[in-house]
Amino acid sequence: MGLVERKIREKEELKDSILKAAKKLFLERGIEKTSIRNIADEIEYSPGIIYHYFKDKNEIFHALHTEGFQELRKRMGILSAIVDPMSRLRAMGKIYIEFGLDNQDMYDLMFIIEAPIDHVETRDDLCWTEGDSSFNLLRITVRECMQKGHFQGHRLEALSFMIWATVHGMVSLKIRKRINILEEAEVENIVENSYQSFLMVLDKL
Amino acid sequence: MGLVERKIREKEELKDSILKAAKKLFLERGIEKTSIRNIADEIEYSPGIIYHYFKDKNEIFHALHTEGFQELRKRMGILSAIVDPMSRLRAMGKIYIEFGLDNQDMYDLMFIIEAPIDHVETRDDLCWTEGDSSFNLLRITVRECMQKGHFQGHRLEALSFMIWATVHGMVSLKIRKRINILEEAEVENIVENSYQSFLMVLDKL
DNA sequence: TTGGAAAATTAAACACTGTTCAATTATATT
DNA sequence: AATATAATTGAACAGTGTTTAATTTTCCAA
């Protein structure tokens, strides 16, 4: 029955249009200032309809945060061409930071805002697979570095987390507006410059 | 006229009781779930009264975030007893992390939530002095380390920011619930353990 | 002690928010 | 064409931050 299939597809299309509208509004006016009613207005439906496609607002946040991870994964794609694990690790941090600065609202959703995690926690058939597979990419790279003799005396999990924390700290302090206190001349490129400091640190390990 | 002074004091007392109530509710049920009406209920006044003492909710957030910085400064107090700048830097990070983990909601307000910064930005007679003086403490210590020959080849501002970003990253990933993806056995003490990794890094610089 | 100005406080309203659900409309099948 | 099913709506609920006119309380001079 082609009809049934078409119906299913149309249903998916509406779900998609909700997400598209949500993302559009998020990027236009910010996440906090986008309401269910705004999204409904955008797709020219009544607010209630959204709850036939998403359990609640958290589920919308979660769906969008997943899109963010797809984009991040895409950017990480070129890493497979880098054979040397240390070079790969360096490039990984650079890509992560660039992604965060280029997509600040998406980064916020992925790594700062609680909503997507809250959604995962309310359903026991879900876990944070997006974060899990991203961190695993880092973990694998760090492990390779260690196998090549780097980072002696360090523990894999703790060191990997430290590296993540460093780049996340830089991006999130920027996104949440905590960098104006730096010397004026430094504010502009502080994240890039301090990542350079971090690379120097990695080299000495 | 002692009367006028008493009046002023009483006015200050009500302002204080608003802050006390706000802090109590923040710590009890979380920042997001505390409303102006909740605070008004707590002090047994009508909601409107709060706007005679604070311009808006952001100003309350800002006042409380300032209290957080007072506590942080207090904890940093013992640092003056540590003469060696490298040891002082190590202790500083430890205190920062411990403060963050012991006072997660306050830390959230101080370094993640935008409200206090938004409040500062709406008033051109204010700037983020709390963050400024805290970061300066770090900057001074790093400078001392450099003067003693450490961190060669690094730039003061970028390196200081990197250090801040590292500890902030650890604490904020924890507070915003991004650490469950780690190996189960590591989750519990990951912040402490990865700070150990960071200390090893500092030593090699 | 009283009258009136000044200050403190409130109640109600406004324009929002996320969410639910009975009622309505549209679609598909017999 | 009638009926069953699915899609969609509108209104309501309980909440939010904020403003403001009205009210109460406080204070001081006459």
Image (cartoon, coloured by chain):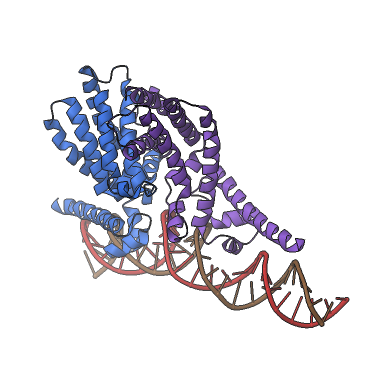
Chain colours: A blue, B purple, C red, D brown
Quadrant position of residue C7: bottom right
Quadrant position of residue C22: bottom left
From the viewer's side, name the closer residue of B82 and A178. Answer: B82
Residue at position x 62%, y 56% in the image: B15
Which image quarter holds the N terminus of chain B? bottom right
Could you tell whether A153 is left or right of B8 in the image?
left
Count of all numbered marks drawn on residues in the image? 0
From the viewer's side, name the closer residue of B80 and D6. Answer: B80
From the viewer's side, name the closer residue of A80 and A23. Answer: A80
Residue at position x 13%, y 52% in the image: A2
- Asked if A3 appears above or below A81 in the picture, the reply is below
Q: Position of residue C9 (x, y in %)?
A: 66, 64
- Asked if A119 appears above or below A166 in the picture, the reply is below
Which image quarter holds the C terminus of chain B? top left
Q: Position of residue B118 (x, y in %)?
A: 43, 55
From the viewer's side, name the closer residue of B191 and D16. Answer: B191
Could you tell whether B155 is left or right of B1 in the image?
left
Residue A29 visible in image: yes
Residue A116 visible in image: no
